[in-house]
Image (cartoon, coloured by chain):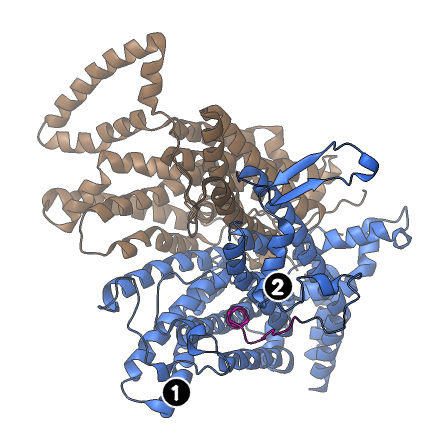
Amino acid sequence: MSVRDRARRALERLIAASAAERVAISLASLVLSLVIGTLIILAGGRMTTCEEAAFVLTHPQPFGVPQLFRMGFCYDPVNVFDRLFLGALGDPLKDGWGPLSPFSGGPLNPFREGYDPLNRQMSDTLRETTILVFTGLSVALAFRAGIFNIGSQGQMIVGGLATAMAVLWASSLFSGLVGTLVLIPLGLFVGAVFGGLYGAVPGALKAYADANEVITTIMLNFVATGVILYLVRDVFKDPDSLSNQTEPLPDFATFPSFLFPDYYGFSFVALAFAALCILALYYVLTRTAFGYDLRTSGIQPEAAEYGGVDAKRTIVASMSLSGALAGVGGAVYVLMVLGNYQTGVPAYGFDGITVAILAGNNPLGVGFAAFLFGVLKSGTTVVQFSTNVPPQLVGVLRGLIILFVAMPEFFRMAGRRVLPADERPGEPVAATDGGHTHGDSGVSENGVESDAPTHGDGVESDDARTHGDSVASDDAHESADSTGGERR
Amino acid sequence: MSVRSKLPSGGDLRGIKLGRRASIAVATVGTLCAIGLLGTLLPGSIFGTLLEVIFAKGTVGSALRRSTPIVLAALGGIFAEKSGVINIGLEGLLIVAAFAAVYAMELSNNLWIAFLVAVLVSTVFAGLFAVVCIEFRADQIIAGLAVWLIALGLAPFASQVVYGAPNTDSVRSPPGMNEVLTGLPVVGTVVSVGGGAVGDVLTAVADLPVVGGLFHASVVVVVGALVEADVAIYLMFLMVGASWYLLYRTRFGRWVRASGENPKALDTAGVNVSRVRYASVLLSGVFCGMGGAALSLGLGQFTGNGQTMVNGKGFIAIVAYLFGNYNPVGAFFATLLFGGLDAIQTGLQNVDIGVPSPLVRIIPFVVVIIVLALAGRTRVPSAGGEHYESGEE
């Protein structure tokens, strides 16, 4: 056991060493996405027509220099991002961004008078955050096992509908506080089971039929949407309603709301539960044998199998757990936001991919990334109200962030260009990179990067040691090299 | 870690399971024959309805029309993946191309320009993807997903900006082949006279009692569908042939295949692997541009709600070329299976067969999953999904 602990500690050191780089890359990606987003807003502002330009780009005209260049745009990017980020928090700052500017010279308290942190917009932000924690954890967990779960959306809606129906059925048996205490855990459990089963399908298809999980999960999203539309439209439909929704759940069967009014659709209880799930998943991944097997399968499947991990079972288990988390997300969405099941659930599953990737697939990071995305999603409605910029902008940002986080090499190259001391002319690039590689094992840890051999070695030999096989180490190295393919 | 291990084919290089493929093909033909037989014998039953729907002239035409964007995207996917870059962003390329085509069509009112703009936009996107994957060594799967998600946001965004709604206004659709032919000066007269005569003969034969039914089902419907089909379908046939030739009969094709199978050998032979890969990924952009333009111009509109009008076609294309074993002709037939199913399900939505339409609509997706599960163990190019770095830079 002590050998295993040592191996684990070595692995953790590697993650810790790379954590700073991960955070830096995520932040840089975020900034870069916002920059590109600005350009897209400006371009969009040129493509559309408006009475009066919202934003004018021109040069300063000191000493009566004639104006040579002037360009008007229909959208004002500064205003858009102001609304997106500050609007989502209910405008906490004095005079907009004033206090943050170096010239404001104002008092240290940046909050405007009468700012109520429990405002409607903040409630929306936290509501989105809560749901995104679950889909983010769902995607992150699968990633850690080396599986791309694009099907969180489908697993979420399957879990959500199952929850709504189960709680509706059981709600006649209980009432009052007892009802709340029984029905909410029941709803979450049912959501987890159904989401998990729906996640197990692509897992089994991958494990036993070698079917690419990216494709199967995306196809299963379509299937889930179709089947659920049928069920909600034709079978479970609320006869009193014109839209496709199930009968409403009784109030005691939904998450109790503290501090915020009931109709805001947000509950701190659910947020606390989400936080608990983050910690639980962190514990499972880092402190349990299952988590260890799962991560090793993600980093080096061959090595994990050599070390006695049943790869097929791990795939199915991680996909089930991933689906269960998405299913719980659906359950929370039904029990906290909707109060019944309605078709047309927003794309939390896709946002979950961004949340997970931005968080480096670390459960603790998912909390922060989910809040950031909660801000983006809730800010979108503010943007829609106060500007005429299309709300699809956030969808674009979502993709851009994924793209940039996926190319850490871009930032490393940029970094090397800024700090040329690092680069010794004449030396092969591969060697330079090799020097860096142990630092970025976090990236590979998540299965995000494909330059395996270097990390592979580290983890692999750990694994070999774990199982106390003296010959293994050499074999393992060979297998690492062969999987590493062409990279030298 | 190699991305390959996360792909359907796993890391192992298993042999080509032609047996599975053949059995699926046989099963498809068998099912069609069974439906035909049962439908002819029991015209009132569900099989009769199915037979009517399958062999309606509209269904064959619509199967071809629906296959066009998928086949073109699959051709693009073949080149990218054969060269060692797995392009999972085909869906995204189709989306941007579909929007660009409609927007360009509205501005220029010229089909050629609309097509070219769509190809250009899609190729630029593919180029960005190539830079990200080849130059910055991003994980190809994640970068591909990013391309999809960016397009999924960007096209409706642009549509909202320009048209004030996620759906664009309607534009003119490409003409059918019959319109093109009759529009030509001399050929037009010949076609309309000859076509009329041939049509009379065909109708006469089709009117014969038993033989007529089968004849009608096979020849008249297919020929009729082809004649009425819009020009994009002919472009698709042309491209299937051209890409087969390019991939298997030219030096460039050899380089593409080598770059995916054994980049080191290609490098040793003095060919720049990165350049071959760039060319292949750009080519996938060109094909997706054609596919997206064919899709949106064929319907005369871009719809950007939900999953947009592309609605998973890019992913179906990936399955199609995996099923077609990376062969352009194979991919075409595989797509015809999906396109046919899609056409049949649309036909069935208009006929009441007792199954609700949302369930009928998922048939193609379910079939994709089944096919992938049966034929998933394809032989992926051995360096597929991996970054290649030549020692000298």
The residue nearer to you, when weighing A80 against A18, is A80
Instruction: Check the image and name the residue furthest to the front.
Output: A64
The residue nearer to you, when weighing B54 against A124, is A124
Q: Secondary structure at mark 2?
A: helix
Pointer 1 chain? A
Q: Quadrant of residue A40?
A: top right
Identify the residue position indicated by label 1 in the image.
A180
Q: Position of residue A340 (x, y in %)?
A: 34, 72
Q: Quadrant of residue A228?
A: bottom left
Q: Residues within 10 Å of mark 1 (few under 14, many from 20)?
A: many
Q: Is residue B155 visible?
A: yes
Give the number of the disc on residue A86: 2
Please identify which colour was used for chain A in the image: blue
Picture residue at 38% right of the left edge, 68% below the top: A158
User: Where does the magenta region start and end?
Assistant: A112-130
Q: Position of residue B231 (x, y in %)?
A: 39, 26
Q: Position of residue A263 (x, y in %)?
A: 42, 74
Q: Are marks 1 and 2 on the same chain?
A: yes
The residue nearer to you, when weighing A226 against A148, is A226
The residue nearer to you, when weighing B190 against A83, is A83
Question: Quick check: B322 above or below B257?
Answer: below
Q: Secondary structure at mark 1?
A: helix
The kind of residue tagged 2 is: Leu
The kind of residue tagged 1 is: Thr
Tell me if residue A389 is in the magenta stretch: no
Which is closer to the viewer, label 1 or label 2? Answer: 2
Picture residue at 44% right of the left edge, 83% below the top: A256
Please identify which colour was used for chain B in the image: brown
Question: Quick check: A38 above or below A124?
Answer: above
Instruction: Check the image and name the residue furthest to the bottom.
Output: A178
Tell me if residue A128 is in the magenta stretch: yes
Q: Image check: A83 left or right of A347?
A: right
